[in-house]
Amino acid sequence: MTSIAGRTAAHDHDRPAAGNWTTRLRTRLGRTVPPGQLLPDRQPVYVNSWIYVFGALTLAALTVVLVSGGVLSLGGAAWWHTSSTGHFVNSLHLWSVELFFAFMVIHLWGKFFMAAWRGKRALTWITGVICFAGSIGTAFTGYLSQSNFDSQWIGGQAKDGLNSVGIGAWFNVLNPGQMLMWHIVLLPSVIGVLVVLHVILVRRHGVVPPIGTETTGAETTGAETAPTVAKGSDDEEALS
């Protein structure tokens, strides 16, 4: 027969510890992203439109950019000049960046014309725009890190403009080592944090509905009340 003290101890063991950091983190994550929204298996029916694909394509291109850039960093800045494999990886890195910007621009303009800041999504829009601006700076430092005459010419043309606005002293485009560190450490770290925040905000508030299809409840709570379908399913019938 279990004593009262034993039953109380077992009950206290099952209760989450209020001062435990894992409990606080789990509680915080639960408040940030509603249960089932982090990796949802269903989306509103209007997500079947192609305009909603370019956000995922941007993330896919960014993944290739990071992986190919990581491989390039193993060989060094001049590896692609002397190795056919390095040249291939460098080309893969370049064209994934091109696709990244193409997908991101289409995604950006698509959300602009959809007024994607509606329904308490202003911070989602702001983080996306800052990511776009930061990506331009990252690409610029990438061109400066090519270690060839092209990068020297770009740096020579850029230094006067940067000096004229007073930032050339700490952002020296003629210093290839500094530009390489900006390109592979500082700017990607900032972009990575912003992308994670952007995705979390999208998961928290849901994808923005087309103008005229949202309801009052969706605009005030951020939750979509439109019919949903299983994303990726061939069945186009909307489910309540």
Image: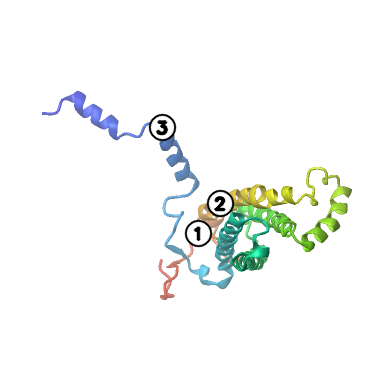
Q: Nearer the viewer, residue 160 or 150?
A: 150
**Which quadrant would the N terminus be assigned to in this image?**
top left
Q: Which amino acid type is shown beneath numbered disc 3?
A: Asn
Q: What element carries label 2?
A: helix
Q: Position of residue 109 (x, y in %)?
A: 68, 65
The CA distance from mark 2 to mark 1 is 22 Å
Q: Which residue is drawn at 58% across and 61% down?
A: 68
Residue 191 circle label: none
Residue at which label 2 appears = 196
Residue at which label 3 appears = 20
Q: What element carries label 3?
A: loop
Q: Position of residue 44 (x, y in %)?
A: 48, 65
Q: Which amino acid type is shown beneath numbered disc 2?
A: Val
Q: How crowded is mark 1: few (under 14 residues within 10 Å), some or many (20 or more)?
A: many
Outermost residue, left direction? 1
Residue at which label 1 appears = 224
Q: How crowded is mark 3: few (under 14 residues within 10 Å), some or many (20 or more)?
A: few
